[in-house]
Image (tube, rainbow, N blue to C red):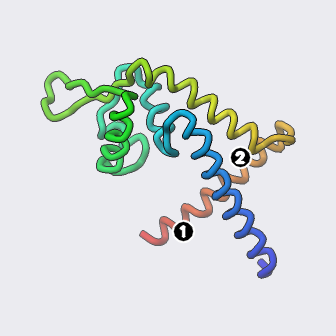
Amino acid sequence: MELAEVLATNKALVKVAKLYRSAQADVLAGLALHPGQDVLLWMLGQEPEGMTVSEVAARLGVEQPTVTRSLSRLEHGGWFVRKSVPGDRRATRIVLTNKGRTGISEIESAWRTLAETATAGMATDQRATLVELLEKVRANLLTLAIEAD
């Protein structure tokens, strides 16, 4: 790859990543959420009986302390409650409140706004190609993370 192409590729990826993250933060701020909290709440919304912290961590592919920190911020906002797990005094289930359940459709609406804004003017096949190419970029970048381990 020629240096000009390297520079153009890096510049485009960095600019899009930064701008998307900023737009995401702005849209989610309207819901009093930060990026990442939306995914956690949405995932909890898919489990009406709730999930334990370890289940959340496993599903998200992160460590339990990371989930615990995120949950403590959301708990103060009244998005969920903790319920004890019968037969296991140490475990608690995280169950969405009415506010949390209502928030799921608002999160999905925020995601729709972001996706539609980012892909405005693209045909359906172009959007599909974009997703396919971004998944290829992701897979390629994961090889660097794997090699670093």
Relative horizontal placement of residue 37, taking residue 131 as reference (left or right): left
Mark 2 closeness class: few <14, some 14–19, many ≥20 residues within 10 Å: few
- Which residue is at the front of the view, 42 or 148? 42
Give the residue pinned by disc 2.
131
Mark 1 closeness class: few <14, some 14–19, many ≥20 residues within 10 Å: few
Relative horizontal placement of residue 132, taking residue 62 as reference (left or right): right
Identify the image quadrant of the N terminus.
bottom right
| Residue visible at 49% across and 70% down in the picture | 147
The amino acid type, in three-letter code, at marker 1 is: Leu
Relative horizontal placement of residue 120, taking residue 105 as reference (left or right): right
- Counting labels gives 2
Query: x%, y% of residue 11?
Result: 72, 69
Query: x%, y% of residue 76?
Result: 34, 34
- Which residue is at the front of the view, 2 or 113? 113
Query: x%, y% of residue 12?
Result: 74, 64
Mark found first going from the N terminus, 2 or 1: 2
Q: Which mark is residue 144?
A: 1
- Which of the 4 quarters of the picture holds residue 117? top right
Tell me the element at label 1. Answer: helix
| Residue visible at 67% across and 33% down in the picture | 112
